[in-house]
Structure formats: structure tokens, C-alpha cells
Image (cartoon, grey):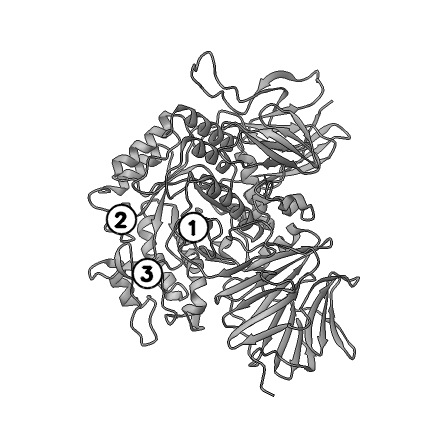
Amino acid sequence: MKNPVSKTIGKFSGYEKNDSGVLISASEGLLRVILYSDSIVKISLSRDGEFDDFSYAVCQTPPGVNIETKEDNDTIRVTTPKLRVTVTKDPIRISFETPGGDVINEDERGLGTAWIGEQVTTYKKLQEGERFIGLGEKTGSLDRRGHHYQNWTTDAYGYHGGQDPLYCSTPFYIGIHHKLMYGIYFDNSYKSFFNFGASNNRFSSFSADSGTMSYYFFGGQSVSEIVGHYTWLTGRMEMPPLWSLGYQQCRYSYYPDKEVKTLARTFREKDIPADVIVLDIHYMDKYKIFTWDPKNFSDPKGLLKFLSDEGFKIVVMCDPGIRIEAGYPAYDDGVKKDVFLKYPDGEYYSGQVWPGWCHFPDFTKEETRAWWKSHLKSYTDLGIEGFWNDMNEIATWGHGLPENIEFDFDGNKATTRKGRNQFGFQMARSTYEGTKSLMNGRRPFNLTRSGFSGVQRYAAVWTGDNVSYDEHMLLGVRLVNSFGLTGVAFAGYDAGGFVGEANPRLFARWMSIAALSPFFRGHTMINSRDAEPWSFGEEVEQISRNFIRLRYQLMPYIYSLFHEAVATGMPVQRSLALAHPFDERVYDHHFHNQYLFGPNILVCPAESTRDVVKVFFPPGEWYSIYNGKKYYGDQEVFIECPIHRLPVFVKSGSVLPMKDKQVGRNVADANDTLVLHVYRGATPSEFNLYSDDGETFRYQQGESSIRKIIFDPAKSQLTLTRSEGNYKSPWKTIVVTLHGFDLLSNSALKEFSYFTPIEKYDPINDPEWMGSETVQMITLPYTDEQLEVRLS
């Protein structure tokens, strides 16, 4: 009988315990089970007796604990208080169970883990009704069931709604079935494939073209707990600079410098808040990074001073291609220090991209990261604090990166087959670590197009070269939702679309949605119409201004959400599957674009062509942000959505900490009034209001402030606990604004709206009213001590 094409590790032959798990010997290989916690288990299988444990993504080590094992004739069990791992002996198969014995996830018994040549695949039994979410930047529906995906970082210009792969590779997903859930992170950076019951009804699977079968299993009682486990393992972001959460205006490209100055002046003249102007590749001399065009940007220092005086930060494009040109300092120094990727024979790899023929840094090499930092200094010396890593898939003309290019992998040599998925991730790492060390304690902002699991430690991510039509607008929402499920809390898309031209209605709708996303940037490409907030007429300008100003009002809330992401890995923009994973309506195509912005704001994206949309209200009660109308949850309702009113609702019982409506020109503008919007409800709530200086890393030494805001409907009381931390908040006044409450004797009644009316055909006599409601306001002096406010 011939050997089968598909090979396994064979039958059990013995096992031994160690400080962190068990090593099981089999007739054709090894199986290793390592505990990282009561809920996190690493599984590795090898046919050659070796395990590749090198990982850029994982930043934790097993703690070394007393392992509880039990062996009988058929199985070996490894048990924790929260999880049971059962390994059958013949054939060797793995099952993950609750302590009570319910199967959470299990190998497909007839298939298990198998090799076909170098390719290795783990097959999992499809559970009845099982859903799959995650994988980060993947098109399609929220539920991945019935679909197949691959991870191979790709320059996907103008991608369509079903295209795969895209720019980022984050091989982590969550399975949901029978009131149980789990997560799996496949720690392998070769080209990998995920099959969630595509073209079969027997198994889900994950595979890689080569390398070790090594994956982490996460147990948990909620999706948020599993995301927390995954981000603990692969790391969490640091606090971003506050200015990076404001509105960012980009174009491919703004030039010359006079146009940049005009853009800045126009924002200020039109009273539209904005914090950032982004310089695309035309600021460079012939697209060469670390240079400035001597004609169009002859005085970068003067330009930056002008923009700083106007209250703007600059973000500069950083492409990895280094033009092959003697006399170009980055090239000459790169050759001298031997930092570029090479073929096996030692010749540098050359590929064409914007500057022409280029070499590319090997960011998996320590010396390269030091070289990159030394050249980034030319930017930080000018006062630049924002960096944009683009074209880092690696993108080259021809889109055929040779697979025999060698990567250093910090001494663990590999080729493109293992290195391609890591290139953007390691470029983001090099940029963030380099600029952080150069900026004298100030926080850099770093944005990347490509990445791998763990990229959240070093950069925000945007969804690349999207297209100006409604499908892409809603696709971007789902991509950011999915990024959040995969550990990337700071994510966004190009509002208005990069490729093509938005019409006025589409731009207005896109800006209103993007204002309630983690990363907020408008962007468009060369040789297209202008796409600034004022470029589509007065009505669109006013809609854009309204929603940009809403974002700036919400900044205390948003900044606190980012602190939660830093502390727990919880995303800022939250798929409804985080809170309601077993509600089938969450996955319905009518509602799978909806999301929670933080815990309390429900956003219901709608096409620009719609004036009415069906909304799913999760359990609870929900208030319209326009007129305070209350909707009962656990139902579907048709809601009007004219172009100036995106359906947005606030959860009853919640408190939104905000600025007042005088938001100023950017996030740094002084505002000493903290407004607490309290929405009446029967359910108590808590919110952690976080503050720090917004600029430095001193928060990591305790220079921050956290106050718990507690709403207790039973006592009809709002409590702000005593401020914890050494940072003194700038607030001088608190205005408690009550929505939906009975009349109080100690409050002032006021007609209130977050927005200003939209001027229509007759701006004076016939404005389009955004909606308003009668609220009650209680004004109090701010204090860092505990504060209690009676609401009845």
C-alpha cells in the first residue's frame, strides 16, 4: 500500500510534563500543549521534531505553572479552572471543553492536523449553527461562515467588495455556537488560508504553505473577554497623541506649500475644526523619502511654523522604497550599513515603485531599524510628529515580489514566503520605535496600510485605496468593525473615497459616519475633484461641519475609549457581535453594518441614496441624538435618514462626557466646561472618564486622571468618584444635562441640539432643522473630590 499523500503525526507513544505544559510523542512527530493562563493554550505540532517559536506577534511568555494532567487508556487531559484540553491517543486529536465537559472546539476526527508536502492544515469539526467572526481586514459579511480567505499582504488598489486578500494579515478569528465561544490565533506568517465551511459541510480549517502548525486557543465567556485575551498575547496600543483623534485632511497631493497654507487658512476661516494636514508623496524631491521638493516645498521649517501657528500638525508620507541613486544620502548610507533586502547570492533586491528602481530596507534586522531611526531624525528635528507608512505590502510595479528574497528575522533567516506578511508590521514597528525615541517623551502618531497580528502596538491602520461609492462606504464600516474584533482599536478609512469622485450626498453621508469612527481622515486622489468639507456646496459643508463638531464635542468620551483600548484591548468601534453574539439579527445583511461607538452610542450607517432605513435596536432603550425621541429595544424600526441626519442613538441609562459646543479650532483649544449628558433609563451604568496631558508618556508614570461616572436610577443619583491619579484636569465647570427626566426644581430648562440648522434655499427663513429637545441643566463648579448630584 502506498503512503497517503496527506500525513499526520501518527499515533501516541508517550508524554512528559514540564513547567508550562506537556510534550506528547507520536510515531511520526510531536505535539506540544503549553498553558499561558487558565484560558489561553498554545498548541504546536511538528513532524520533524522541531518547533519554530520565533514570533514578532506574541509578546508574552508562558508563566510556568503546576500542570494538572490525567491519563487513561484513550486520552490525556490537561485541566485548568476554566478549560479542559483533551488529547485522544489513536488517532491524535485535540478537543477543548468547558470544565463541565461541553465541547467548545474540536478537531475533525477523521482529519485532525495533516501535511501535504510543506503545507500544514488543522481541520476543525463544524459545529451546528457555528458562526465565525474576525480575521481583520476581510471583505464580505460579518459572519464568515461559508467563505474562504487567505492572508498574503497585497497592494489592492480600488479593491471590490468581495476581493481577498487585502493589505493586512491578522490570522485571528472567533467561533460562536450553542452559547459557547472561543478564539484561535494562527501564529504563522507564511501565506495562510482559512476555510469556514466553504465548499464543504464537514470542517473549518486553517493552513499555511509552510512552517510549524502553531496556534493559540482562547476560551472565554464573552467576545470582549476573548479579544482581551488575544490583545494581552499580541500586545495593546499605547495612548495616541490627542491631536491624532481630531479630523485629518489629506489629498494625493497638496502642493505646492502655498496650497497647504491656503487649505489651513480655509479651515480656520470656515470655522471647521481640524487638527492635521497630511502631506502625500509630492512633498518629496522626486518621491525620495527623507527629502523635500526644492521648488514646491523650499522652506519646510517655515511651512511647519505657519501650520503650527494655525493649530495644525503635519503627517508625512513614509514609503519604504529607497531610490538607487549615488549621492542620495539614504541610499548611500543604506548601502554602507548593508540594510537592504537581498537575493540568496547577496545581490540587493531591486523593484520599481514611485521613485523608480529602489532597494527596500529589511526591517526584520536590528541594524536596519537603527538606520531607519537615524534618517527619521530629519523629520523629528523639524518638529514633525506624525508618520504615514504606505506601500508596505511590499507594493511594487508588477505586483510579483520574488519569493526567494531573504529576510534576517533577527538572526532567524527566512525568505519572502515567511517575510512578506511581516514587512509592513516591522516597518510600522521601526517607525514607531524610532520616532518615539527621538521625540523627547512626546507621543508619535503612526499610520500604516499593511500589518500583521500585533501591529496595534505600533500604528493605526486604515483600509487603503477605497472607492467613492456607497458599497465601499459601508464596506469600510465592516472592515473597521472587524479590525476591532482582531485587536486593532485605532482604525479607519478614507472618508469620501480615495479612487473616483464622490457626489455631494455620498460625501455628506460618509463624513457623518466617519466622524464616529476611531480614525477620521478625508482623502482623495490626484486628478479628481476637490474633496474638502466645503467642496460640495454650502449644504454639504454645513453637514460636514456639524458632524466634525460633534466629534470634537465627544472628545472626552472618545479619549476615554482609547484609554480603555490601551488597558483592555476593547475596540473603540464595536461590532454588535461583541455584545450580542447570539442574536441572529446582528448578522443579518440589513443590520451587520451597525455598530456601537464605545458602549453607549449606536451608529446605523445608511447609503447616501436612502431617506429611510431599517434599524435594529438591541435590548434596552435608545434616544435619538436629534430630538430625544425614545425607542424601545429588541425590535426593528424604520427610521427616516435624510442626508443631514445619520441615524445615531444613545443608550438609556448612560452618561456621555463631552465638551460644550464651543469646541474651538482643534482638540487643544481651551475648553474648561465638562458637560455630562445623562440619558434617563432603568439600568445603572458606569463610565471611566480618563484624562492626561494628551502629548507625552508621563501618563505611564501616573500623571493621569480617572474618574468613575456612576448613574444609579434606583437612587436617581449621578456620582463622580474622587479623581485618581496625579493629573489635574483642566475643567472648571460641570454642566449636568438631563435627557428625558421629570422636571427638577434646581435645574434650568433649555431647548438643546448638538447641531446647528442646515441652511437651505432660504437660509434665514427656511433652514432645515436638525431637531432639538427640551433638556434640564444643572451647573456646578468642578472639583476633583467625589461629587453626588440628585436627579429627582
Q: Quadrant of the C terminus?
A: top right
Does dot 1 land on a helix, a strand or a loop?
A: loop
Q: Locate residue 95, reporting x and y percent.
A: 70, 68
Q: Is residue 285 left or right of residue 227?
A: left
Residue type, numbered disc 2: Met
Rendering coords of residue 374 (x, y %): 33, 57
Q: Earlier in the sequence, mark 2 or mark 1?
A: 1
SS class, disc 3 = loop
Disc 2/disc 1 C-alpha distance (Å)? 27 Å
Closer to the camera in the image, 590 or 226: 590
Q: Which is in the foreground here, disc 2 or disc 1?
A: 1
Closer to the N terminus: mark 2 or mark 3?
2
Q: Is residue 62 above or below residue 428?
A: below
**What amino acid type should be assigned to the residue bearing mark 3?**
Gly
Q: What's the residue at 45%, 28% (across, down)?
A: 545
Dot 1 or dot 3, earlier in sequence: 1
Q: Find out whether the residues at labels 2 and 1 contact each other: C-beta distance under 8 Å.
A: no
Query: Mark 1 to mark 3: distance in Å?
Result: 16 Å
Indicate which disc residue 490 carries. none
451 sits to left or right of 94 = left
Seen in the picture, residue 87 relative to 747 is either above or below; the reply is: below
Residue drawn at (34%, 67%) of the image: 341
Q: Which residue is mark 3?
A: 398
The residue positioned 53% from the left and 64% from the top of the image is: 193
Crowd band around label 2 with a 10 angstrom C-alpha radius: few (<14), some (14–19), many (20+) = many
Q: CA distance from mark 2 to mark 3?
A: 23 Å
Q: Is residue 508 left or right of residue 603?
A: left
- Left or right: residue 757 compared with residue 142: left
Q: Which residue is mark 2?
A: 284
The residue labelled by disc 1 is 159
Say if residue 626 shows up in the picture: yes
